[in-house]
Amino acid sequence: MSAIGFEIPVDIRRIVAGLERFVRAEVLPRHEKHAGLLDDPRKRYTPDGRYVPAVVDLIREVRVASADAGYFNLCVPVAMGGLGQGHLAYYVAWEAINHLCGPHHWLGTFALAHWAFGPSVVLEQLTDVARERALPGLVSGRQSMCFGLSEPGAGSDATMIATRAVPDGDGWRISGRKMWTSNITFADWIVAFAVTDPARAAAKRGGISAFLVPTRAPGFTLERVTLLQGDIGGAEGESTFDSVRVEPWQLVGPLHEGFRIALVGVSLGRVYNAARAVGLARWSLEKAVAYAGHRIAFGVPIAEHQGVAFPLAESAMEVHAAHLAGLNAAMLLDRGERAIKELSIAKAYAVEVCLRAVDRAIQTHGGMGLTNEVGLVHAYNTLRIINIADGTNEILRRTIFQQMARGDLDL
């Protein structure tokens, strides 16, 4: 039985069902076998906060196994070696992974090529040389990448980046600083955005270019791991470019038009985060309903108390609406529509109501809801982060109203 009243195309359903089987066969057993390593942050991270080599190896194993099984590159363009599925498949697959894995089996997030960590339409305009040098490793899962856009003075307004790429012979030299770069602690490549025409950039008429840079390039330094939510390690980091030489083959897309590529990536990120939120909220609500059904208080299961049952029912209403909004936005994008308003609505609404759903699931569990064992706090921390990632809820509300003010009042 499905709560969705329209049919997801059969090819997408079959692929995602296969992806779920892959996760059960390749991801869940790895977590069971390596629980001591993957579940304990004292073992998972090095003293400076990076993943230890054994964890990086497990992540790579999942990527490679998924690529070999035909799932990793589900939404990568066919010309790049992928299956060429669209936004709807991307949404459905990410929702399924997070619903199945929850926060505990987090290796599942590497079973599918994330737009900022692996191959995607973001790299569709690579040069022939870059395709030859970078794509085989990324598509096979042997290598990964990261997305270097945000800077200390350029977050929500990414057009304010200060990193510069100055002409140097037939290439450029990049100097600047990047922060909030996910996956940077073990990525092999970084798509770095830099100003190449200061006048155009100041006028917000382009002037920003994208470059594919190996993270071992002379002059590139990962300065520190950015620690989040009180953890002792992570995959976010801050880096510097000190006159890093890049050649013409490393330019991604047209010169001075890199910000358009950035917007493509951020839009994919909003689809991903909307799906991720719904998946984690569904996982959390299922745990809460099960717990409420067998936890006895005052002589009856706590599910019989309205103070417990009604908040969970409220979240079911909200998560269902978020699920539909995400599917709708993805379908509009696959139809070729820009869906700026609809995608902004889907992401902002999903991350807010799904965070609330997890919070209610924690409350349902009482003290047990705060334990690492149950995992709800990990889901909460993840959702709290993605209330900011790829467009804060405030920025998305601004975007929604701007579209309405321009006459887009269809709801």
Image: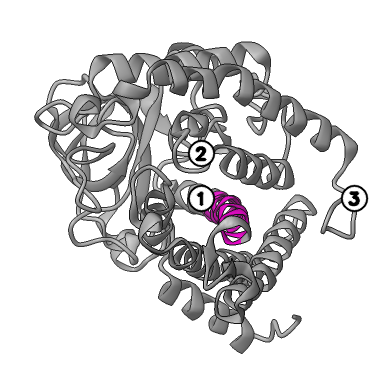
Q: Amino acid at mark 3?
A: Glu
As drawn, is 342 to the left or to the right of 376? right
Position of residue 189 measured from the top left corner of the image (x, y, whole percent)? 34, 25
Please say whether residue 249 is one of the residues in the magenta stretch.
no
Mark seen at residue 269: 1
Badge 1 element: helix
Q: Amino acid at mark 2?
A: Trp
At x 34%, y 26%, the residue is: 38
Circle 1/circle 2 CB separation < 8 Å: yes
At x 83%, y 58%, the residue is: 4
Disc 2: which residue: 115
Q: Nearer the viewer, residue 342 or 335?
A: 342
Residue 294 higher or lower than 170, as above or below:
below
Position of residue 157 measured from the top left corner of the image (x, y, whole percent)? 33, 66
At x 69%, y 81%, the residue is: 408
Q: Nearer the viewer, residue 78 or 229?
A: 229
